[in-house]
Amino acid sequence: MYLKNISILSLSVILTLSSCSGKKEEEKTVYENTKFKEKDQNTVQLSDKQLQSIGLTTTTIQEKTMQKRVRLNGKVEIAPSHISSVSSIMGGHIKSIGVINGSHFSKGQVLAVVEDPQFIQLQQDYLVTKAQLESARLNLNRQKDLNITKATSDKTLQTVQADYSTLNATLKGLEEKLRIIGINAKGLNSSNIRSKINVYAPFSGFVSKILVNNGQYINPSDTLFELINPVGLLLELKVFENDVNDVRIGQEILVYNNQNPDKKSTAKIVSIVPSIENGGSSIAVAKLSTPNPEFIKGMYINAEVTINSRFTIGLSNESVVSFESKNYIFEDLGNKKYKMIPVNVGISDDQFTEILKADNLKDKKIVQKGAYSLLMALKNKAE
């Protein structure tokens, strides 16, 4: 009986020790697995099936002559000097309006018709003065002839000459007033006096605003229309602080809108605002080389500026992936294992991205096709 109790006690001790030993081994294994996971968190191990599905290819760091392409965005604006307010030289009632908001017009086109009795009076005054001037001219010639024989005094001749000069000046003034309101005084006679005048377009462009309506009485100081001359169209582009030193006056750029990105127009930078705003950007002003009717005031546009070329090293664009605002590439470690490496990128174009401080990558095999798939696999592994 005593021996039996000893055996049971010994077995209990052995089981307890064994249990403790197993627990320590388990904790050690978990710890080692955790360490391995932390150490291995930037690598991906693919199976044969995964490798075949991705179609992964590799490349190496390459040397290339590149051009930096700066992408800008902004809005279409109009220079203040090419926004015109149109009014009538003389007041009157609006009889008709020949345009609508946004419509295109040509230089010399009738925008509106204004009617008022004062137009009749102005034409009448001109014709009466013209007749009086002719009578004064005949009287002046007669007085000159009489003065030669001293049949009339010098004083009388001087008075007649003054009357003639006054009427001539009055006629010239009336003629100029008629010209300003669009009436040709030379062709005016008593049979073609009219009560209406036309308001003509001073240039070709677009109607921005119509500020009157039919029947409204307007004064000479009232604005009837706001017109836009497309020749004054400007592009105001935002230039971020990192690119300010690369963008210069005189550079040619390509401009396009979001609705038609494949149709690019050329423009030239004509001005750069010498200050950085709170958002960390400046403004470059550009002008289209040729008018583009698709660009209208207030439209958002994009632009590309190509900077002088330089010799550099880098990788194809598909080799570089981005995650949480950082850039990475994947190194082929062999045996279907790939390591994610952070990199700093420089300039880029449609096919190639510059890699800064890439000397340590020159002898490495870098993933080209499939880099994004590796990034997705690594994110899933981390989760």
Image: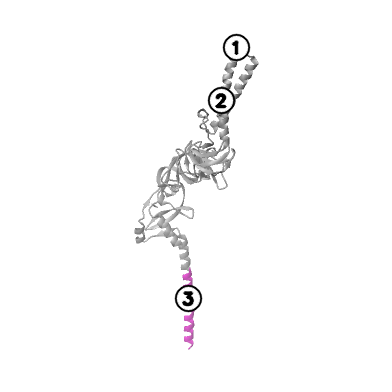
Label 1 amino acid?
A: Ile
Of labels 3 and 2, earlier in sequence is 3
Label 2 amino acid?
A: Ala
Residue position for label 3 = 19
Residue position for label 2 = 131
Q: Nearer the viewer, residue 85 or 161?
A: 161
Percent across and percent down for residue 246 are 49, 41
Label 1 – label 2 distance at C-alpha:
26 Å
Of labels 3 and 1, earlier in sequence is 3
Image height check: is 15 above or below 151?
below
- Would you say 372 lies left or right of 111 here? left
In the rendered structure, find residue 202 and report the number of the disc placed on it: none
What residue is shown at x 45% (from left), y 65% (from top)?
A: 33
Percent across and percent down for residue 79 are 53, 39
Which class describes the residues within 10 Å of circle 1: few (<14), some (14-19), or many (20+)? Answer: few
Image height check: is 140 above or below 82?
above
Q: Nearer the viewer, residue 297 or 39?
A: 297
Of labels 1 and 2, earlier in sequence is 2
Residue position for label 1 = 148
Label 3 amino acid?
A: Ser
**Which stretch is magenta?**
1-27
Which class describes the residues within 10 Å of circle 2: few (<14), some (14-19), or many (20+)? Answer: some
Percent across and percent down for residue 25 are 46, 70
The secondary structure that dominates the magenta segment is helix
Within the image, what quadrant is residue 276 found in? top right
Percent across and percent down for residue 161 are 61, 19
Which class describes the residues within 10 Å of circle 3: few (<14), some (14-19), or many (20+)? Answer: few
Q: Nearer the viewer, residue 27 or 46?
A: 46
Q: Residue furthest right?
A: 155
Q: Nearer the viewer, residue 83 or 42?
A: 83
